[in-house]
Image (tube, rainbow, N blue to C red):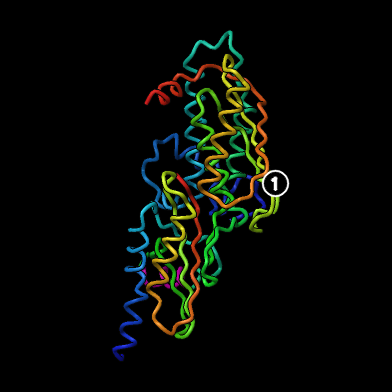
Amino acid sequence: MSVIEKKEKDALDVERLSAQVLNVPGVTNIYPPAPSLGQIPMLVTAAVTGTPPRLDQVSVITDGATTELSVRVGTSIDSATPHTATLVANALLENVPDGHEATVKVRISRIA
Amino acid sequence: MNENDPRTLDCGKTVEELSDYLAAGRSPSDPRIETCPECLNALQGLTRLTQLFQDLITQDVADLPAPSENWFQGIMTNIHREVRAGRSVPLPHPDIRVDLSLTEGAVLALIRSVGDTVPGLLVGASRLDGDVETPGAPVEVSVTASVLWNRSIPDAAHQLRELICVALAAHTALNVISVDITIEDLHGDLPNTVIHKEH
């Protein structure tokens, strides 16, 4: 793995991205993505390996050139939700390596 | 998951299961529920409803108009309907690579939660009418509620409307053109609400 590839891999590390999202003021939780057919391969793998999947984190889907970052979060009722959502998106965008095409999807599922 | 079952949430849980879970004191903790935003939104509404029911049955309500069992069932059904994720309510962001949104369920749960802070008032149902998925499109908010029997209905309705307007302005980018409040029922005393207000 080249140095550049390692930097890109580190930048898109799911655990690190998730921690950054949770550090955004106003974010209370990261929730698993809504149930979807796309989760089936992960759930099958988990069933075979016996390892429960970590779903409550940022989802990173990349083909090497294009990256999709998505996350479903809860926010505090004491913070303006549009502002919190913007901060989450900005935090994720900052991690996209230079030259990558990326999209960021932030969905607020609970305000409490 | 059964999307056609009117009592089943998107995650597969039913309102009855959540009600039983709440009755058991949320113990043992079920991570599938505690990490599901729709379930948590439903639990919040059910908690308030359960509190009201317990308050009423421990009071001497002989002379007061008590809500019927159907009334409670109706609110449970409304809670279920509202907490489903529903439509995506967009939020603005200057970068075209970014897609920000709220679930409709989160917005309706927000309305219920702020409504339940109004002393002597319990939200029955809430609805967003209009194309909430198109930024700037006009949206009408409709809310039904029950009010404490000796509470001023105009005051309660006014307070509810104000809180909803403030909450939606703070937490969404919806172009709300009206908030219609309909008081459909009266109910007995809510001592815990008064206590909560004092804090």
Which residue, as the protein is rendered here, is positioned at the far bottom?
A: A2
**Where residue A54 appears, x then y in whole percent?**
38, 64
Q: Position of residue A44 (x, y in %)?
A: 46, 71
Chain bearing mark 1:
B
Classify 10 Å Cα crowding around label 1: few (below 14), some (14-19), many (20 and above): few
Q: Would you say the magenta stretch is mainly helix, strand or loop?
A: helix
Quadrant for the N terminus of chain B, please.
bottom right
Which contiguous range is marked in magenta? A42-50
Instruction: Single out the residue that lies furthest toward the left.
Output: A3
Q: Position of residue B100 (x, y in %)?
A: 52, 61
User: Residue B3: x and y, percent?
Assistant: 64, 54
Q: How many marks?
A: 1
Residue A47 magenta: yes
Residue A13 image-quadrant placement: bottom left
Q: Quadrant of residue B80?
A: top right
**Observer-nearest residue: A70 or A51?**
A70
Q: Amino acid at mark 1?
A: Asp
Relative to A103, is B43 above or below? above
Residue designated by label 1:
B129
* Secondary element at tag 1: strand
Residue that appears at 43% across and 51% down? A75
Q: Is residue B199 magenta?
A: no
Residue drawn at point x = 43 percent, y = 22 percent: B192
The residue most toward the top is: B63
- From the viewer's perspective, is residue A38 above or below residue B130? below
Q: Residue at x 42, y 62 (%)?
A: A88
In the image, residue B176 above or below residue B162: below
Residue A34 lies left or right of residue B25; in this view the side is right
In what quadrant of the picture does the C terminus of chain B appear?
top left
Q: Does residue B152 sit above or below B96 in this rendering? A: above
